[in-house]
């Protein structure tokens, strides 16, 4: 019984090591691209990778604020977007509240790095009294 359990553990560890080697590391540096609302280009954007940390920035993220009826239908000036998070494998996912925010508003990001094409794509957003989402596509240049 002890041998079969040990063999299973060794097999599982070997499998995990092989799977970990198959995941290509995200290339560090700056990826430059654009934010899109549907098919319309909204703003330039950058994704900076340092180790397992990532920073996503964009000059303008289109948002709509909550109106008197409770719907997010009141047009508003675009907001500056900034997300800081951690890369897990080839993916980024999470929320980021700016250090001086304090009002319950936060930025979201969910995307994937493609090592073969040295690119990043995903969705970014802003949540709070106003809301907005956009698609980001960036390439390492």
Image: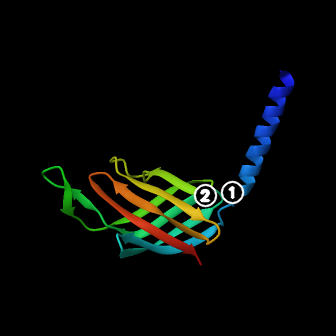
Q: From what the image shows, is residue 100 above or below residue 42?
A: above
Residue 114 in the image, given as x and y percentages of width and height: 60, 66
Which residue position holds label 1?
23
Tally of marks = 2
Q: Which mark is residue 74?
A: none
Residue 23 in the image, given as x and y percentages of width and height: 68, 57
In this view of the protein, which residue sits in the foreground, 102 or 110?
110
Classify residue 30 as left or right of residue 6. Answer: left
In this view of the protein, which residue sits in the foreground, 16 or 32?
16
> How crowded is the residue under tag 2: few (<14 C-alpha within 10 Å), some, or many (20+)?
some
> How crowded is the residue under tag 1: few (<14 C-alpha within 10 Å), some, or many (20+)?
few
The C terminus: image quadrant? bottom right
Secondary structure at badge 1 equals loop
Which residue position holds label 2?
90
In the displayed orientation, state which residue is furthest to the top: 1
Which residue is at 41% across, 66% downward? Answer: 135
Residue 133 in the image, given as x and y percentages of width and height: 35, 61
Pointer 1 or 2: first along the chain: 1
Which residue is at 62% across, 69% downward? Answer: 29
Classify residue 31 as left or right of residue 5. Answer: left
Which residue is at 56% across, 66% downward? Answer: 48
Classify residue 133 as left or right of residue 12. Answer: left
Colour scheme of the rendered structure: rainbow
What separation in Å lies between label 1 and label 2 (alpha carbons)? 8 Å
The N terminus: image quadrant? top right
In the displayed orientation, state which residue is furthest to the bottom: 141
In this view of the protein, which residue sits in the foreground, 16 or 139?
16
Asked if the residue under mark 2 is in contact with the one under mark 1, i.e. CB atoms within 8 Å, the reply is: yes
Secondary structure at badge 2 equals loop
Residue 86 in the image, given as x and y percentages of width and height: 57, 53
């Amino acid at each position: 019984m002890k041998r079969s359990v040990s063999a299973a553990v060794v097999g599982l560890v070997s499998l995990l090591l092989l799977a970990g080697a198959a995941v290509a590391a995200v290339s560090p540096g700056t990826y430059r691209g654009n934010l899109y609302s549907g098919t319309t280009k909204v703003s330039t954007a950058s994704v900076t990778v340092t180790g397992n940390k990532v920073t996503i920035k964009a000059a303008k993220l289109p948002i709509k604020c909550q109106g008197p009826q409770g719907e997010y239908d009141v047009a508003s000036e675009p907001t500056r977007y900034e997300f800081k998070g951690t890369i897990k494998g080839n993916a980024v996912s999470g929320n980021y509240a700016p250090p001086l925010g304090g009002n319950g508003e936060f930025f979201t990001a969910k995307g994937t790095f493609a090592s073969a094409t040295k690119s990043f794509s995903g969705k970014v957003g802003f949540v709070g009294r106003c809301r907005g989402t956009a698609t980001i596509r960036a390439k390492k240049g």
